[in-house]
Image (spheres, rainbow, N blue to C red):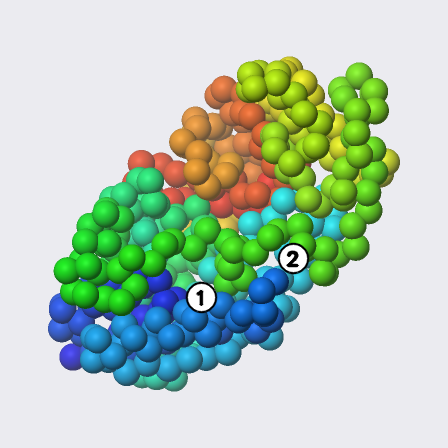
Amino acid sequence: MKRVVVGLSGGVDSSVAALLLKEQGYDVIGLFMRNWEEEDENGRCTAEDDYADVRSVCTTLGIPYYTVNFAKEYMERVFARFLEDYAEGRTPNPDVLCNREIKFGPFLERAAQLGADLVATGHYCGVKHENGLNYLMKAKDASKDQTYFLCEVSGKQLENVIFPLSGLLKSEVREIALKNRLSIAGKKDSTGICFIGERKFRQFLSGYLPASPGNIIDIRGNKVGRHEGLMYYTLGQRRGLGLGGTSDSQERWFVVEKDLKRNVLVVSHGDEAPLMSKALSTGKVNWIPLPPEKKTFQCTAKFRYRQPEQRVTVTVEDGRAYVEFEKKQRAVTEGQYAVFYRGEYCLGGGVIEKVYK
């Protein structure tokens, strides 16, 4: 009987993944990762609540469970980079780093110590093993597909990994949890930053980075207001600007640029042209499982998580990618990831370093 160590978060997805594996006859062990130790703004440690849910689920399933503390690794490998990016005006995606540096790093090592033959998570994606190579595949549920967040995981890291939810819809996963009377069946999905939870973002970030208020100007250079600190704003943002505007979405103010040198937030009132771009360049791309054979090729790509795939032409040089869009794109943001696809295969991705208008 093969032993599978399942990463349990206390949520519905990972709990159902464990249940399915047990039903399939595996020797299942649950492993809960504690990656954040500070209390939230209400004085609660959300990790304690999640661990209580893990205990409940594992008791129901009759499987052993352990906890492991990766708070130091998370702080050094993920959170420090997250703060650095915000300080430099980028909008980072810590979930991508968390997968590469924690869930498919120290977690795999701890699972091996527990005698794991295989490792499983509750991610909505798949893996295909063919000719000695490991390919990252899209999930059946396109609305929940999480390959975007796994774009920095290597083919080697996927070698002994299984994703039990790859062929299920989210609605089916909830149904399975309810049918088996798991205590977390009605628990809502987490939408906060990886492992940090759903906090008031400005309040949270201000505890680590000093805010530097400045002027808000329109695209003609006129002062129209004051901002609380450039790190609190993202390209295309409409809410929370404090500038008013009409109910007509075409006439609302939105962010088009963050000028770090002048500490100025640039906004537009209706005209989206400054938000549009024709191309981008990335840092070093992680290709899954191998780099492309051709230097220039066509595929599809996403530049943020919940975005339909866009047709692009990619040119690879020195490990980096220059990506031309078939159609101009709105609010492509430095610090996010460009993730490449061909059909059902996720080819990998890299951090967006520069956007070309």
Q: Which mark is residue 204?
A: 2
Q: Amino acid at mark 1?
A: Lys
Up/down of 265 relative to 274, above or below: below
**Mark 1 sits on what residue?**
103
Element assignment for label 2: helix
Up/down of 190 relative to 1, above or below: above
Quadrant for the C terminus in the image? top right
Quadrant for the N terminus in the image? bottom left
Task: Give the percent coordinates (x, y) of residue 178.
Answer: 19, 59
> Is residue 33 visible from the viewing direction of this image?
no
Task: Give the percent coordinates (x, y) of residue 269.
Answer: 67, 18
Up/down of 228 relative to 79, above or below: above
The foreground one among 216 and 95 is 216
Task: Give the percent coordinates (x, y) of residue 175.
Answer: 19, 54
The foreground one among 273 and 216 is 216
At a point 79% along the width and 29% down the height, the residue shown is: 225
Decide which of tag 2 and tag 1 comes sooner along the chain: 1
Q: Amino acid at mark 2?
A: Phe
Relative horizontal placement of residue 182, taking residue 219 as reference (left or right): left
Residue 182, quarter of the rendered image: bottom left
The foreground one among 291 and 138 is 138
Relative horizontal placement of residue 192, taking residue 161 as reference (left or right): right
Give the Cα separation between the discs numbered 2 and 1.
24 Å
Up/down of 89 relative to 248, above or below: below
At a point 67% along the width and 54% down the height, the residue shown is: 203
The foreground one among 71 and 214 is 214
Foreground mark, 2 or 1? 2
At a point 34% along the width and 73% down the height, the residue shown is: 54
At a point 52% along the width and 55% down the height, the residue shown is: 198
- What residue occupies the far front of the structure in this picture? 42
> Is residue 255 visible from the viewing direction of this image?
yes
